[in-house]
Image (cartoon, helix red, strand yellow):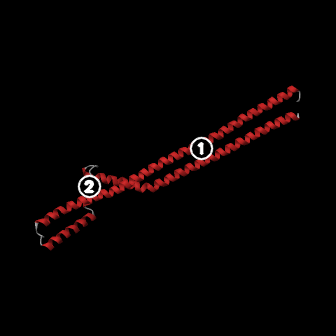
């Protein structure tokens, strides 16, 4: 009887130890999966923060590009005319033209050529030249905003790809951790079944030998 009891005790001890190992593996897998979830959440939070920081620059680049397209006629003749007229009627342009024309008149007055044909020709050419320069300057200013918006959008796209890659790796780690815990639990079940078979075999041997 003591032999059977010892045999059963060893088997039960083996089952208990295997169960404890399985539970420990399951807890470890849960901890690893939880860490992966936390890392995924942090990746998403950082990407959202970056997107929010770059949003004003991206939004500024879009209308700037449209403004450039309007100035060179890519959005149609009516929009081109409207963009040029807006520049021509702007307070800055009107002030610059007025000051330039006054300077020309003062120079002509000082040299006695106020009524000459040269001053009239200069005045006639001054405003169109000023407008042409203003269009070129406006296009360059808009180009700066367009480039800034493009760079910011590219930064968002690059950050998005990096974040997606990192999240993909973390999801794989999470899946591996969960799968490892499930495999460990399956191993415990198989070990328990093998131990039960061991009990039956030992008891059968004892009974066959007449020791029970």
**CB atoms at circles 1 and 2 under 8 Å apart?**
no
Direction top: furthest residue: 208
Against 107, residue 145 (above or below) is above
Which residue is identified by label 2? 82
The residue tagged 1 is 174
> Where is residue 117 drawn, in percent x and y?
11, 65
Residue at point 42% right, 53% down?
152
Q: Residues within 10 Å of mark 1 (few under 14, many from 20)?
A: many
Residue 52, above or below 107 = above
Q: Where residue 63 sits in the image (x, y, percent)?
A: 35, 54
Residue 94, position in %: x, y?
24, 65
In the image, taking residue 204 as reference, residue 138 lies left or right, namely left
Residue 127 located left or right of residue 5: left
Residue 139 lies in quadrant: bottom left
- State the quadrant of the C terminus: top right
Mark 2: few/some/many CA within 10 Å (<14, 14-19, 20+): few
Front disc: 1 or 2? 1
Q: Secondary structure at mark 1?
A: helix
Between the C-alphas of marks 1 and 2, the distance is 58 Å
Corner quadrant of residue 204? top right
Disc with the residue nearer the chain's start (1 vs 2): 2
Residue 136 placement (x, y as % from top left): 27, 57
């Amino acid at each position: 009887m003591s032999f059977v009891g010892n045999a059963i005790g060893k088997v039960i001890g083996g089952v208990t130890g295997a169960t404890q190992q399985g539970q420990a593996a399951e807890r470890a897998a849960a901890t690893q999966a939880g860490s992966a979830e936390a890392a995924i959440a942090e990746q998403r939070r950082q990407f959202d923060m970056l997107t929010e920081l770059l949003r004003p620059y991206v939004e500024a680049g879009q209308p700037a590009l449209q403004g450039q397209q309007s100035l060179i006629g890519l959005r149609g003749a009516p929009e081109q005319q409207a963009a040029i007229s807006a520049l021509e009627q702007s307070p800055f342009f009107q002030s610059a033209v007025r000051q330039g024309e006054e300077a020309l008149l003062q120079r002509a007055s000082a040299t006695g050529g106020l009524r000459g044909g040269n001053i009239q020709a200069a005045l006639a050419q001054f405003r169109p030249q000023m407008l042409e320069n203003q269009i070129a300057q406006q296009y360059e200013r808009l180009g700066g905003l367009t480039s800034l918006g493009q760079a910011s959008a590219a930064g968002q796209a690059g950050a998005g790809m990096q974040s997606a890659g990192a999240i993909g790796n973390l999801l794989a780690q999470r899946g591996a951790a969960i799968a490892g815990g499930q495999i460990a639990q399956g191993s415990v079940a198989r070990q328990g079944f093998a131990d039960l078979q061991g009990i039956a075999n030992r008891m059968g041997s004892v009974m066959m030998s007449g020791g029970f």
